[in-house]
Image (cartoon, coloured by chain):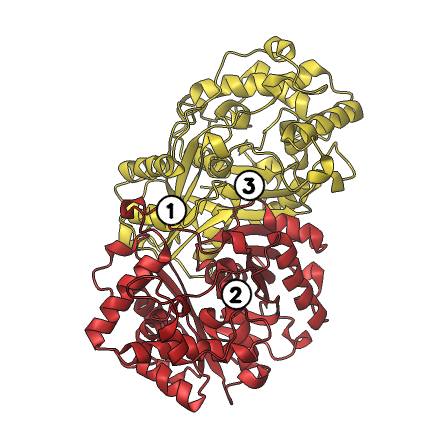
Chain colours: A yellow, B red
Amino acid sequence: MRASIVAHGSTDFTVRDGPVQDTMMEAIRDLFKHNPGVRREEIDAVLVSTNDGSGYLSAILSEMCDLRPRIAHTVESLCSSGASALVSAVSYIESGLARSVLVIGGDRLRDAGRALDWDAARGGFKSPVFWASIFTRAYKRRFDVAAEELAAVPARNRQNARDNPHACSASDCTVKDVIKSRCVTDDLRLLDCSRPCTGASALLLNNGDTSERFESPVRVLGIGHRTASASAVRSRRFFRMETVAESASMAYASAGIGPSEVDVAEVHDAFSVCEPMAVEALGLAEVGCGAKLASEMLETGDKRVNPRGGILGSGHPPGATGVAQAVEIVAQLQSRAGRRQVQGARTGLIQNMSAAATSSSVVILGT
Amino acid sequence: MRASIVAHGSTDFTVRDGPVQDTMMEAIRDLFKHNPGVRREEIDAVLVSTNDGSGYLSAILSEMCDLRPRIAHTVESLCSSGASALVSAVSYIESGLARSVLVIGGDRLRDAGRALDWDAARGGFKSPVFWASIFTRAYKRRFDVAAEELAAVPARNRQNARDNPHACSASDCTVKDVIKSRCVTDDLRLLDCSRPCTGASALLLNNGDTSERFESPVRVLGIGHRTASASAVRSRRFFRMETVAESASMAYASAGIGPSEVDVAEVHDAFSVCEPMAVEALGLAEVGCGAKLASEMLETGDKRVNPRGGILGSGHPPGATGVAQAVEIVAQLQSRAGRRQVQGARTGLIQNMSAAATSSSVVILGT
C-alpha cells in the first residue's frame, strides 16, 4: 500500500462538555501547528468520525480551516467510527481518488456512551455495562481468572495514562483500588469501566508522493475488519472475540507479518475484560493468558500494550478513539512518545471495535 | 475503473413516516428479490447513507439481512450523502479493500429537510427556502428569465414523475399551476419546492469479476467532487454553481468524455432554479439557457434531464436522493426505464449536492 500517516494532532480528553466542532478544530489546529509541511491545497478529502449526529460537519470544519477538499463526509460506526474513517481514508488514497486525506475523530461528553438503543429486546439491560458484565463473568469462569489478575488491566492502564498529557483518567490506581471500587453490576466495578468524555484527534494521510516534507512518515501495512452483527446476544461464546480474531488474521495476512512482529499495540479496552480478550484474539497472548500478561506488564513496567493508557486510562470519546489509538502508534513508531516510548518499536497495531465486539477493525502500521 | 453497478432496489417515496431501518430493509429486499445472482458472502462492505443520526445502522442492517461484511459504516454529507456513499463504495473497490459493496440510502420524513442549524448567523432565515430564494432572484435577474420559463421545471418534473411508480409528487401540474400556487417567499412558490419524504434506494457494486452473474452491469466511468464551504453566504455569485462546474469538469476529465456525450442526467432540483443552474454548470445547456431548455423539453416530451421526475417529482429523502438518482441512470442505461426510457442512452450522469451547492458530486456511468 502507498498510504502513509504523515501528521497528527490531539486535544486533551476531558469531562468538560462543549460543541463538537470546537473540539475538532482544536485537534486540527494542533496538527497544522506542528507540521509546517502541510499544504492545505493538497488535502483532497476531509473525513469526520463522530457519533454526534449533527449534519454536514466535514464541510463545516473544512470552511472553518479554509480547506476546499473534493470529498468531505462523516463516517459513523459507533465506537469504531475512528478506525472506519482511517480505513476509508486509506481506500481513497489507494484508489487514486485522493492524494491526501485529513481524518478528524471526536465526540463530546453528551454523546459518548449512549445506550444501545436498537437493542430494545434487552429491556432495561441496554447499557454497554451489561454486555461487559456477561463477558467478564464468562471469561473469568472459562479461564479461571482471579479478580486480582483482571484488575491489573485498569490499574496498569490508568497508571500508563500518567505519562499521557491528554488523558482523562490518569491515576495512581492500584489493583486494590480497583477491587475496592463500588459495584456497578454483579461482575463489574466502577474502575473496570472507561469514562465517556469530550475529545478529538486528527490524522493526515498521503500517498507517499510528498512525504519528504514530513518527518518520519508511518506506513499503513495491513487492514482487517469484520462485522458480525449489531447485537451482542447473537454471539455464542462470550469468552472470546471472534470478530477481533478474524480482523486480526486478515490484517496480518495483508501486512505479511505475524503477531510476534508487533512491537506495540493500542487495543479497545472500554472495559477491563476487553483488553485480555483482545490481546488473545490478536495473538499477542496465549488464549486465557491475557489478564496474566497485564499483571506481568504492570509489574515490569512493560508498555507494549496500551502505552497511552488505552481507553480506560485516556477516556472514551467514541468518535475519537480509533483515531487517537493511531496517533499513539504513529508517535511510538516515530520514537516521539516520551516517557511512554516502547524502545525500538518499528511495527504497531490498533484494534478498535463496537458494541460487544459485534464488529472490529485492525490496522497495522510500520516504519 | 473496475467498479460496476450490478443491481439496484427501491421503495416507494412516501409521506408516511416510519423507522428508517424498515424503509432501508424494503429497498434491500427489493434488490435481492430481483437479482438472484447476488451472493451474500461476496458483499465485503455495507455503506449506509442517511441523515437519520441513529447509530450503527450499517451493522444493524447487515444483521437483519444476514450479511457479514468486513467494512460497515454510515456516510453522511447532508443532501449529498448518497453520492458520497456511492463514491466511497467505488474507492473501496478500486483500492482492492472490497470486491462487492452494498450501498443503502434512506431517510424518513421526520429527518428530511431539516433547517441548516449550523448557519445560525442567518437567524430565522435558516431554512433552505431562503438560499433558494436568493438563487432564484439572482438567476432570473441576471439572465432575464421569466417566471413562466422557470415554472416549466417543476411542471415538467412532476409530469415526468407520473411514469415513475415510486414517485411521491407526480401530478399533471402545468406551468400555470406552478405560478398560481401559494407564495412561500417573495421569490418561491409552493410548487417550486421539493417535498421531504420517507424512502430508500439500494445499489450493489462489484469489481467486475462476477459481472457475468448479473444482467447488463453499468460501469462507473468518472467521478468529480468539490466542497467549497458549508454556508451559502460564502458564495459571491448566486446565479451560477461553481462547485457543480468544478465537479463536472473533474468527472468529465476522469471519464474522458464531454457534455455532448451525456445521453441522460439526473440533476439535483431540490428547488426549481437548481435544475437550470445545474444543467448549465454541467455543460448540458448554454449559460442562462437552462430554463429555456426545460420549456423546450416540456413541449417536446424530451426526457433526457430528470426522467424519473428529479427531486421535485420524486420527493426528497436526502439520504436516498443520490442513490435514487444512480438507480434511475442505471435503469436507463440498461434500457429498463419503461415509459421514462431515453432511447439509445449509453452514457449518463448524476449530479448531487448539499446546502446551496456549497458542495457537489458528479458521477458518470456508462455501458
Identify the residue at horizontal 52%, vertical 65% (top origin). B323
Name the quadrant containing residue B250.
Answer: bottom left
Name the residue that disc number 2 marks: B323
Real-space Cα distance between discs 2 and 3?
25 Å
Q: Is residue A184 left or right of residue B232?
A: right
Q: CA distance from mark 2 to mark 1?
A: 24 Å
Q: Earlier in the sequence, mark 2 or mark 1?
A: 1
Disc 2 + disc 1, Cβ < 8 Å: no
Residue A358 vs residue A3: left or right? Answer: right
* Mark 1 residue type: Asp
Q: What chain does badge 1 belong to?
A: B
> In the rendered structure, which amino acid carries the disc numbered 2?
Val
- Whether A11 is drawn above or below B264: the answer is above
Q: Chain of mark 2?
A: B
Instruction: Identify which residue is drawn at 36% across, 76% down.
Output: B151
**Which label number is shown at residue A188?**
none
Q: Would you identify the image quadrant in which residue A162 lies?
A: top left
Query: Mark 3 or mark 1: which is in front?
Result: 1
Q: Is residue A318 above or below residue A146?
A: below
For residue B239, say whether it is visible: no
Marker disc for residue B117: 1
